[in-house]
């Protein structure tokens, strides 16, 4: 069973890398192998296959970390805390990846590394939350307290997320697909005409995109499985009376 | 009839990976006095804190049954009086102010006379308006007794009850335990053999360290 | 509620005697405001900057003082006696009330200093500013109190506090800055209705959640 997932991951990742990087981008795609050209984006549109999955995993990892944190609070099983912390550690890694891939891309498309649009702000806050979570853990020396208080903190920090997901994008203008912008003529907020924001994926791009999401998610679970099992082995090997 | 009962079942406590005690079970009925003993670090104070509801057990359970109903975790503090060396009172207040505050926070209907009476009993009446900070260790121990009996608890948990006390103070504790309500429970954690007289029964925590189940 | 009030009362009287938080807070405010005063040195800056700077000073002064309620109990070892005389909910509410009063006091001073020292910090719409001020203080006090409870159990308390509190308080502060800007421009209160609703829901969610989880933090 484990081998199955590994091979599946290998195949999917290969497909995603090839499918994401090889197909030429042309103005009027004639066949299956060509992606449509988006003015102003060109080859830079390929970021979507790699950047979005990392952002998605950042969020997924947080949810998993919180889920196992709550489970720890209910059952007081230290293994749940290990699952929680390893989910969060990977989440932090993906969060950094999402931030870096995003800002490098932004430099070339929007002109500077950072713009404080709602999504950028959200990922930055998430980075801070992950940082705070680990800072808290390192300041607690009893295992039980560490597990308990970091679980509580993950819940409290989570309560602010509706604000970043639902409220801020409505109150601020943004640069990501689906954002709103201010109409320079009327001063009203409206759907944007910017190419990135209007960005719609062609059918073949969408296939690669969802393959990529799947592949990255499997990759994540594989890493997560490994890390929390390592933690468990370490813990058990140190067990004393 | 009012009847308090303490039931401890399979109680276990570990700190990180260190086992303190395991498979601890006992029952204490109204009127009984129990002594807990064991080597330094055997977990006496830990057990007292768990029974006071201020520390979590690792597994197993303990409950106070009153009139055949279980007392909620949140309400345990109402029926408990605790005295121990690691109990610290607010030393920026005087003994009287401490007790007065506790009475207010506990929502007790007692007046200043009653508080003075308790302080008198604990032998602190003359110094009742001095800040606790200026007290000697023995005097601090006496204030703790006063605060432990302020709300007329059903259960008295005493950790090292006679530490820092002079002969007069020890007599006070003797009298307190002897005259403690007959429908109440007293649990004493101690290593002093002279304190063993307080209990009818002794539990030695060194007997609860077996770890064979693993 | 009565119990919570007396816990508040205890903290209040002890603050009057010991000044665990107040001195630090007042010194902080003086230092922060004069630093801003010197660094601006009569230069004309955008009005919006003042709205931001006002809440930044509020945030950091909260961070310098509001953790004392729990940290001082933990440091002096009085946590035990407190848990022996009251249930966790009363304790949380008592501490929250104390922080709320402290925050109102200190933030009124900050607002007052801003108004006399910076001509450009002039509120045109008092209704929306006061409403934001009140709701903001409630929210800041709520989140700061629960985070203070968490860090009081940790080893390095001082630096950890703003680190943990910042992401949690940020949505609130962003809203407060928006409303303050609007109030300085004299826009009608209906312009910031959405922001005020967010403030209200933030306060309700944070305080409810804090009351629910406090018990888990409190008992060792
Ligand atoms: N907060 C804590 N964190 C980690 N270990 C602890 C903690 N409190 C107590 N212990 C450990 O639990 C064990 C029991 O401690 P406890 O204070 O209950 O012993 P005791 O029987 O009261 O000892 P004494 O006779 O010295 O008072 C000790 O090994 C101690 O090191
Ligand atoms: Mg002890």
Image (tube, rainbow, N blue to C red):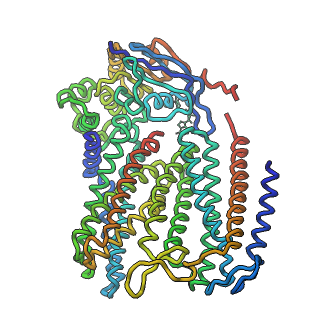
Measuring from the top left, give residue B180's x and y in whole percent.
Answer: 33, 17
Q: Can residue C68 be seen by looking at this rendering?
A: yes
Query: In this orientation, which residue lies closer to the viewer: A239 or C145?
Result: C145
Measuring from the top left, give residue B9's x and y in whole percent.
Answer: 54, 22
Measuring from the top left, give residue C81's x and y in whole percent.
Answer: 37, 37
Query: In this orientation, which residue lies closer to the viewer: B3 or C211?
Result: C211
Say which quadrant the N terminus of chain C sits in.
top left
- Position of residue C52 relative to residue B43, above or below, is below
Q: Can residue B94 be seen by looking at this rendering?
A: no
Residue beneath the point at 46% across and 44% down: C217
- Position of residue B33 relative to residue A32, above or below, is above
Residue beneath the point at 42% across and 83% down: A183
- Position of residue A37 relative to residue A234, above or below, is below
Residue beneath the point at 57% across and 84% down: A110
Left or right: C94 in relation to A171: left
Measuring from the top left, give residue C118's x and y in whole percent.
Answer: 26, 79
Query: In this orientation, which residue lies closer to the viewer: A233 or A114?
Result: A114
Left or right: A7 in relation to C218: right
* Residue C57, image quadrant: bottom left
Residue beneath the point at 38% across and 80% down: A188
> In the rendered picture of this protein, how many numbered marks are placed on residues?
0
Query: In this orientation, which residue lies closer to the viewer: A126 or C40?
Result: A126
- The extreme front residue here reads A30
Left or right: C213 in relation to A110: left
- Position of residue A51 relative to residue A236, above or below, is below
């Amino acid at each position: 069973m484990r081998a199955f997932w590994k091979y599946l991951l290998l195949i999917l990742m290969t497909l995603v890398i090839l499918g994401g990087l090889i197909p030429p981008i042309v103005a009027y795609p004639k066949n299956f192998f060509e992606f449509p050209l988006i003015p102003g984006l060109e080859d830079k549109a390929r970021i979507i296959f790699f950047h979005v999955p990392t952002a998605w995993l950042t969020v997924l990892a947080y949810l998993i970390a919180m889920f196992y944190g709550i489970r720890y609070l209910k059952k007081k099983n230290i293994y749940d805390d290990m699952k929680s912390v390893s989910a969060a550690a990977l989440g932090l890694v993906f969060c950094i990846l999402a931030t870096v891939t995003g800002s490098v891309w932004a430099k070339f498309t929007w002109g500077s590394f950072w713009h404080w649009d709602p999504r950028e702000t959200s990922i930055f806050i998430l980075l801070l939350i992950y940082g705070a979570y680990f800072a808290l853990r390192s300041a607690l020396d009893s295992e039980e307290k560490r597990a308990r208080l970091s679980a509580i903190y993950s819940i409290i920090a989570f309560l602010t997320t509706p604000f970043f997901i639902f409220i801020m994008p409505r109150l601020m203008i943004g640069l990501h697909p689906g954002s709103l912008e201010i109409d320079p003529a009327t001063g009203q907020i409206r759907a944007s005409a910017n190419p990135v924001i209007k960005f719609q994926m062609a059918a073949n791009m969408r296939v690669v995109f969802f393959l990529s999401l799947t592949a990255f998610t499997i990759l994540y679970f594989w890493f997560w499985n490994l890390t929390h099992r390592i933690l468990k082995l370490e813990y058990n090997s140190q067990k004393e009376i | 009839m009012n009847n308090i009962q303490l039931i401890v079942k399979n109680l276990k406590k570990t700190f990180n990976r260190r086992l303190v005690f395991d498979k601890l079970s006992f029952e204490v009925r109204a009127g009984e006095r129990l002594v807990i003993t064991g080597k330094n670090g055997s977990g006496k104070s830990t057990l007292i804190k768990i029974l006071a509801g201020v520390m979590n057990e690792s597994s197993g359970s303990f409950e106070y049954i009153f009139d055949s109903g279980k007392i909620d975790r949140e309400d345990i503090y109402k029926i408990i009086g605790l005295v121990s060396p690691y109990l610290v009172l607010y030393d920026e207040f005087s003994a009287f102010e401490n007790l007065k505050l506790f009475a207010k926070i506990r929502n007790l209907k007692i007046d200043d006379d009653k508080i003075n009476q308790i302080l008198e009993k604990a032998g602190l009446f003359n110094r009742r308006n001095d800040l606790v900070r200026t007290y000697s260790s023995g005097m601090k121990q006496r204030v703790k007794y006063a605060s432990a009996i302020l709300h007329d608890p059903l259960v008295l948990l005493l950790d090292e009850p006679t530490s820092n006390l002079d002969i007069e103070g020890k007599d006070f504790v003797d009298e307190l335990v002897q005259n403690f309500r007959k429908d109440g429970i007293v649990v004493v954690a101690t290593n002093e053999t002279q304190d063993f007289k307080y209990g009818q029964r002794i539990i030695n925590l060194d007997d609860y360290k077996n770890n064979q189940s693993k | 509620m009565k119990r919570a009030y007396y816990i508040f009362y205890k903290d209040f009287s002890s603050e009057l005697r010991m000044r665990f938080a107040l001195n630090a807070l007042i010194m902080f405010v003086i230092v922060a405001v004069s630093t801003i005063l010197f660094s601006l040195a009569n230069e004309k800056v955008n009005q919006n900057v003042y709205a931001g700077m006002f809440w930044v000073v509020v945030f950091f002064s909260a961070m310098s003082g509001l953790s004392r309620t729990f940290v001082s109990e933990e440091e002096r070892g009085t946590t035990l006696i407190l848990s022996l005389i009251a249930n966790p909910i009363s304790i949380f509410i008592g501490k929250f009330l104390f922080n709320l009063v402290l925050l109102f006091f200190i933030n009124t001073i900050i607002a007052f200093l801003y108004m006399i020292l910076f001509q450009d910090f002039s509120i045109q719409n008092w209704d929306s500013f006061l409403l934001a001020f009140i709701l903001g203080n409630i929210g800041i006090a709520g989140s700061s109190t629960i985070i203070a409870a968490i860090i009081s159990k940790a080893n390095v308390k001082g630096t950890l506090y703003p680190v943990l509190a910042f992401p949690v308080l940020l949505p609130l502060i962003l809203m407060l800055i928006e409303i303050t800007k609007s109030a300085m421009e004299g826009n009608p209160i209906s312009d910031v209705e959405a922001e005020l609703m967010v403030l209200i829901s933030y306060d309700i969610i944070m305080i409810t959640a804090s009351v629910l989880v406090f018990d888990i933090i409190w008992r060792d």
